[in-house]
Image: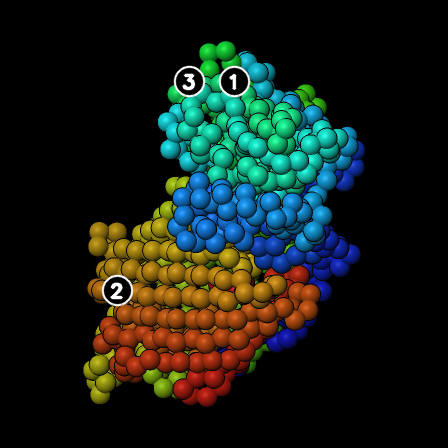
Amino acid sequence: MNTRKKKLLVLMMTSAMMTCPVWASDETVAQPAPAAGATGYEPVGKDVVAADVVSAAGMSGTEKMAVNATITARADKATQDTMAAAQSGLTGYETEEELAAIAEGKTPEEIHKAAEASSQESAAPIAVPGTGSEAAPQAAETAASAETAPAAASDAASQPAAAPAAPAPKLPGTPVQFPARIGDFVVDSSVPNYPMAVIPPEGGVNLPYGSLVSDSDVAPYLNKTATSVTVSPVPDEKIEENILPRLAMRVGDAVNMAYIRHDLNVIGSTGIFSTVKPSFTNVPEGVMLNYTVQMNPVVNGIEITGNKSLSDGDIKKLITITPGSVLNTSIVSRDIAAINTTYNNAGYMLNRVSEVSLDEEGILHIGISEVHVEDISLRGNTKTRDKVILRELRFKKGDVFNREVASRSIQRVYNTGYFEDVNVRLLPGQKNAQDVIVEIDVVEQKTGTVTIGAGYSDSDGLVGILGLSETNLRGTGDKVSIQWEFGGETNSNKNYIFSYTHPWLNDQGDSIGFSLFDRENDYNDYDENGDEVADYDRQTRGFNITYGRVRSEYVSDFVTLETKETKYKDYNSGLNYPELSKDPNHPEYHDYMDDNFGRTNSLRWSHVFDNRDNVFDPTRGKRLSFTGVWAGNGLGGDFDYFKFIAENRLYYKVGHAHVIAVRLMGGIASGDMPYNDLFTLGGADNLRGFEDDEFRGDKMYLGTIEYRYPIAKKVQGVFFVDAGNAWGGTDKVPWYHDNDELHVAGGLGFRVTTPIGPIRLDYGVGDEGGKFHFSFGGKF
């Protein structure tokens, strides 16, 4: 726009003073970061089962909608070397003589003889691997009896720390007791129907089986020589043959408490026994040691109970227990952890396996506890109607609570632009303690604006401006806006834009909107060198109507029908197109007015994918759009052409509130097109460092990269590089000579949030030097 006609600063000053919104309160304090290891659902009071799940206070970008309750699936992965050691048969208790015999490839009998010879020389105990102490770890005298199996517990790491107390579903049969956090192991299937878990040598140190025998139980036999070491009764002797090589106690060894505990962990962790305990029989040469075991029953089938969010088939794919085989509690523990982890990864962070039982028919029952949304409570929306918030949610009463769905829902609520802050908490259900009440607490912001201003220019004189806008009309979410300019030299009272949008026509979120416009502006034409060639008043008037169709969560289609008429009004300076069109000395301008001014009737279709976390200040995600324009060709009007535009916007968060934003655009057109509808580049909105609309053509490409960083509250800094060009199809514009050269500009800028909307200040340096750009509106 001509610098002579740019409105005086009094326009901005007056507008800022008269506008309805006020600066956002600085009193809002960001929620403290959760402590290390916290899930975000820890209790904050006796009636609250979870801390804020989602908070937008004091944050920027996607942090305003980030779900604090992040559950990390934990599964300690042993290295391949460790797992190889687990299968090697080494216990970690071998003597130097045994290791040497193994290295020489001797038979087990020869190895045992080497062990006996070693034990004759010294019966002193050796250190337990991993303890860092020469003393063997001692269990408390109050440890549970060796006949008691480990307590049942699913992997605590895969459960939320403060999930609502979920009563386990009543399952038929006897509860299956299985260890928690057994760690990594491999399954030895060499004995048919008796799969045995094999843990790494160091993996047995922290297992519970060894602590189930007390010092007093073994004390009478300590330091006596073991004349035999057996595991019985077992239904297949191969089971014992499989286990014995991995035991620390060998024939000829002195009874050692550390060895006993190690062996109990090895035997118990195989998973196929319900009980295991050491039994000693005194003989003249020492003691006979038998690890007395009781086999688990056989599993004949598997049934899943209580699951809705994951199907039986999906869960059974995670279960490695084979019907027809003996029940293996170690495998059960691993499978339960896999199920819980899968629930967490799918966003069902409060769901978990709550009970496992085996009935008399050998059917293994796995009970799933799923947490549902009992109710949705809204707070803080004094103006906005409940339905406006509820329709943005992607969950409803009775749904299984899902973290990802909740996060997306809060993104949608915040992206309406009606709220400064959105917070969510989970409260215990009133009807069912297992379920939750989702409480959504919002802080409304001013959505109505009245702008009154004035401006002065040499050509127009004193011009008055009145602007009214409301993005949440009467709390319904409807948007209405009118801007009216009056006075000036033309004394026209028809310089206006009026628009109205109804964002929710139906339950799918389809929208409809329309605009009426009659605008007269001072306009400048620039040639390919950025030199001004004409200054004149141009009037554009017409209307459009847009229908938006939601295809999926992130995909929408928009169809716009528009009619507009462009007129040449008053000549100011430079080339006088109407006069040149009559000048016989300039035949190239004879059809200029008809070729470039007139009525255009068009149909526009846009297909948009948009998964940005925050439409106002995105930090993650992308917006991909494809747009086609069909003008004339049966729709009437003075021009017939087609246009196609593709655009991709990408956002990457690289630090706290630091973002890299990328925009790639390309377009092509064909047909009878006025130069006002050609692709244009140059100015504040795309190719900075150049004049407004300096480059034009029926082909276009543009690339932009911005590095955005915070400076102060409501102020953001930007470094940018723009590159692109528009060319071709300018044969009806005699004063413009296009080229297909790449134009590049770089610079810096600032983004300032004000009561009248975002303001952009950019300084770009291009091929023709530097240029300052001042504009209103949000960033791309």
Location of residue 95 in the rendering, given as x and y in whole percent from the top left corner: 55, 50
- Kindly identify which numbered label has been placed on residue 272: none
Disc 1 from disc 3: Cα separation: 10 Å
Q: Do callouts 1 and 3 mark residues in contact (Cβ within 8 Å)?
A: no
Q: Secondary structure at mark 1?
A: strand
Disc 3 from disc 2: Cα separation: 69 Å
Location of residue 346 in the rendering, given as x and y in whole percent from the top left corner: 49, 39
**Mark 2 highlights which residue?**
669
Please report the residue visible at 57 percent of the width from the left and 48 percent of the height from the top.
118
What amino acid is at disc 1? Answer: Leu
Please report the residue visible at 52 percent of the width from the left and 52 percent of the height from the top.
97
Q: Secondary structure at mark 3?
A: loop
Of residues 130 and 331, the one nearer the viewer is 130
Location of residue 108 in the rendering, given as x and y in whole percent from the top left corner: 43, 41
What amino acid is at disc 2? Answer: Ala
Asked whether residue 408 appears in the rendered view, the answer is no
Please report the residue visible at 63 percent of the width from the left and 39 percent of the height from the top.
254
Scheme by which the image is coloured: rainbow
Asked whether residue 658 appears in the rendered view, the answer is yes
**Mark 1 highlights which residue?**
358
Find the residue positioned furthest to the top.
360
Q: Earlier in the sequence, mark 3 or mark 2?
A: 3
Tell me how many marks there are.
Answer: 3
Of residues 426 and 88, the one nearer the viewer is 88
Of residues 21 and 124, the one nearer the viewer is 124
Placement of 382 over or under 432, stated as above or below? below
Q: Nearer the viewer, mark 1 or mark 2?
A: 1
**Mark 3 highlights which residue?**
300
